[in-house]
Amino acid sequence: MINFIHEGGPIVLIIAFASLFGLFLLFERLIYVAYIRRKTGSIVENLKKLLRQKRIGQIRQMCKNSSDPVSNITMKLIDSKRESGYLGGDTLTLLIENEMIRIQRNYKLISMIITISPLLGLLGTVTGMIKIFNSIAPSQSGGIAYKAELAAGISEALYTTVAGLVVAITLSILMSFLWELTDKLEATITEGVNDVANFLRELSDEEVR
């Protein structure tokens, strides 16, 4: 790896740092989404159990102590029920969209890294070609130096291209997996929140207060 970076020059080093940063962001989101998806089912069951018992105060306290999407939405649904006595489908859709925006934090940044990695590789190719053309120009260094400069230019051109493509392909595959998990999480949250909202609709305004 060190030899690869050395042969590819400074641009490969930039690509390496970008890939590490992108992988960190991606795995952090993967772990978070998988954890929330696994946790959502039990949260919804607890909320429905408490709603059957009409223990709104305990539900609010539980939601305050949690930071998961379903708890956040439930708290806002209770507040909406208290204020207007109405829980419309538009309200649910908006609340879910807001939570999904929060879940998808750093997705655009990861996508940007995927986009610029091959462009950085192309930039390295161009700088490598410039070194090749410079080595062709007459110099006082003689044939041995000419061959060394030519090899360095070719190495930089090829290594940066490979590095940029490898990073983009790897992150793209992982990002596709992350989007699949995110879509499944959204479906789980939507189903759970609709169940909670249906229980809340059955309660009178006095029972919610």
Image (cartoon, rainbow, N blue to C red):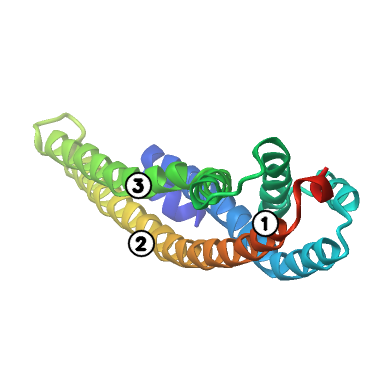
The residue indicated by pointer 1 is: 201
Can residue 142 be seen here? The reply is yes
The answer to which of marks 2 and 3 sits earlier in the sequence is: 3
Residue type at tag 1: Arg
Instruction: Provide the residue designation for mark 3.
Output: 117
Residue 184 position within the rendered picture, expressed as x and y whole percent measured from the top left:
52, 68
Tag 3: amino acid: Ser
Q: CA distance from mark 1 to mark 3?
A: 50 Å
Position above or below: 6 against 30: above
Q: Is residue 79 left or right of residue 16?
A: right
Picture coordinates of residue 61 (x, y %)? 88, 46
Q: Secondary structure at mark 3?
A: helix
Q: Which mark is residue 169?
A: 2
Mark 1 or mark 3, whichever is nearer to me = 1
Comes first in the chain, label 1 or label 3: 3
The secondary element bearing badge 1 is classed as helix
Mark 3: few/some/many CA within 10 Å (<14, 14-19, 20+): many
Q: Which quarter of the rendered picture does the C terminus lie within?
A: top right
Q: At 50% from the left edge and 47% from the top edge, which residue is drawn?
A: 97
